Amino acid sequence: MDSRVSELFGGCCRPGGGPAVGGTLKARGAGGSSGCGGPKGKKKNGRNRGGKANNPPYLPPEAEDGNIEYKLKLVNPSQYRFEHLVTQMKWRLQEGRGEAVYQIGVEDNGLLVGLAEEEMRASLKTLHRMAEKVGADITVLREREVDYDSDMPRKITEVLVRKVPDNQQFLDLRVAVLGNVDSGKSTLLGVLTQGELDNGRGRARLNLFRHLHEIQSGRTSSISFEILGFNSKGEVVNYSDSRTAEEICESSSKMITFIDLAGHHKYLHTTIFGLTSYCPDCALLLVSANTGIAGTTREHLGLALALKVPFFIVVSKVDLCAKTTVERTVRQLERVLKQPGCHKVPMLVTSEDDAVTAAQQFAQSPNVTPIFTLSSVSGESLDLLKVFLNILPPLTNSKEQEELMQQLTEFQVDEIYTVPEVGTVVGGTLSSGICREGDRLVVGPADDGRFLELRVCSIQRNRSACRVLRAGQAATLALGDFDRALLRKGMVMVSPEMNPTICSVFEAEIVLLFHATTFRRGFQVTVHVGNVRQTAVVEKIHAKDKLRTGEKAVVRFRFLKHPEYLKVGAKLLFREGVTKGIGHVTDVQAIAAGEAQANMGF
């Protein structure tokens, strides 16, 4: 991680919100103006036909891996050829974890040749037969005209093929929602999930709040989850069509789970916990058009960069501003994204075609950052965001998923509830392995370092019953009459065969992102490692006596309250007031259960 990310943290921690964008933060070019362009180095130099938008004459060459397939044409294939095509489609669907994109009229080297109308119709008919054979659905995303040495109009068609894997109920994507207080995060989620526009006074967000003080203040202080579904045809499924979450899950082939995080600086610890613990696939950073980059916006951006969470940006409240104000906010964002600490390529989305391109490039390149401008009151450009979310593929490939599933079971405990007639329920994410109803696991570490046996009675995902949970999926597990007092956030439930190790002392290689003075031995910070959140004291800074902003070192920490389960290589983030730092765990001093209290100083 570039230590210059510290500028993002330092700016918003200074009194008065720090310097204005473009003051001390320099923008560095990253591929020219953002507009609707693609990544750095990709030129839009296609031929112009009749004033239509230019299209590049080439796409990147087809990759053997991934979920994108190029086909010049699929006209009347032989039976042998058809079976080969079906096998190929299964492979692409597996690579995309249930989704694949077919470019019809494109050669394998990426040359945009195009097809006449009759050939395109026959090719789409064959593609439909292939999809039926594997039990998938197809949706035409867009058509483009190309000019390729022919007097007849020729077209390229982009098709989305979607099939829910046999071992899943639906495709799942987790999106963390970041942004400054009062930027409209909960309102936007209310509009998306409830299917009704806001009245300009926050009516859309009322159903999302969990506490009375949130309704009274209009500010989120806790983590909440909202779901948005898409059926096999790409149509939105939300509470406007369904009464319950179960109905949404049953009608959807793809689910977007939004993790609504707090925007106020007072609840920053909750936001960090949501980012580190819930393992979002990507993040949505909301920026109000009338205030621009203000408050915790820069800090939330820095958190996403530090934790390497891909993100896209939504500029909200465009109905309250003049067009020039919106353009100024977008330019401000572009300058910040291009600076050395970020080094992103902004991509402004103004049409449905842009939304399709943005979704594909966002998944392929971590540097591309789409920017949407919309209103939750007028509904302006809201459909473009829905198109983007519908097409956005899983950001982890199938090989990584398979490798995680082969490992022993490890479930992070993030939430703990007591449900009448059900008993104790824990919520969290399955980091590795497979978890089934009836499995016997051990949970810990307790204050004395022990791991306790328990049994998984039932599993629910997005409030719907589920018999099997796979690595990377979030769910709630019912534990029956297991004593809730023995559980806490930050614990893990693992297979007994794992023989888990615990520690009270660990070492980490860190970068001090921001600190007002010098970082010394004895300084106490709140450490975030995955779902672990606990105060730790700095015991030793190797090879140095103290650290200043931007400096790196290997530091030994000791937890103050109870031992934790940590793994070498895990990402680490620590904070205390304006002090911020990131790094990764390099060593853990494993201790036995009986030694835990002695090591904690009890």
Image: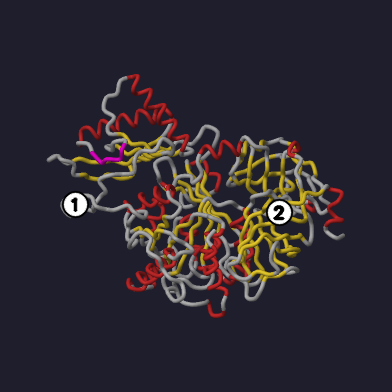
Q: Which of marks 1 and 2 is nearer the N terminus?
A: 1
- Look at the image and say whether residue 93 sits in the magenta stretch: no
The quadrant of the picture occupied by the N terminus is: bottom right
What kind of colouring is applied to the model shown? secondary structure
Q: Residue at x 31, y 38 (%)?
A: 109
Kindly tell me whether residue 417 is visible in this rendering.
no
Note whether 451 is above or below 510 in the view shown. Answer: above
Q: Counting other residues with Cα less than 10 Å from the Cα at mark 1, is it few (<14), some (14-19), or many (20 or more)?
A: few
Rounded to the nearest whole Å, what is the CA distance between mark 1 and mark 2? 57 Å
Q: Is residue 355 left or right of residue 111?
A: right
Q: Residue 490 carries which label?
A: 2
Based on the picture, tell me whether residue 112 belongs to the magenta stretch.
Answer: yes
Q: On the rendered image, what quadrant is the C terminus found in?
A: bottom right
**Residue 243 screen position, x and y as percent:** 52, 49
Residue type at mark 2? Gly
Residue at 34% in and 40% down: 61
Q: Mark 1 points at which residue?
A: 48
The magenta-colored residue range is 109-113
Is any part of residue 117 visible from this angle? yes
The image shows residue 187 at horizontal and vertical percentages of: 49, 63
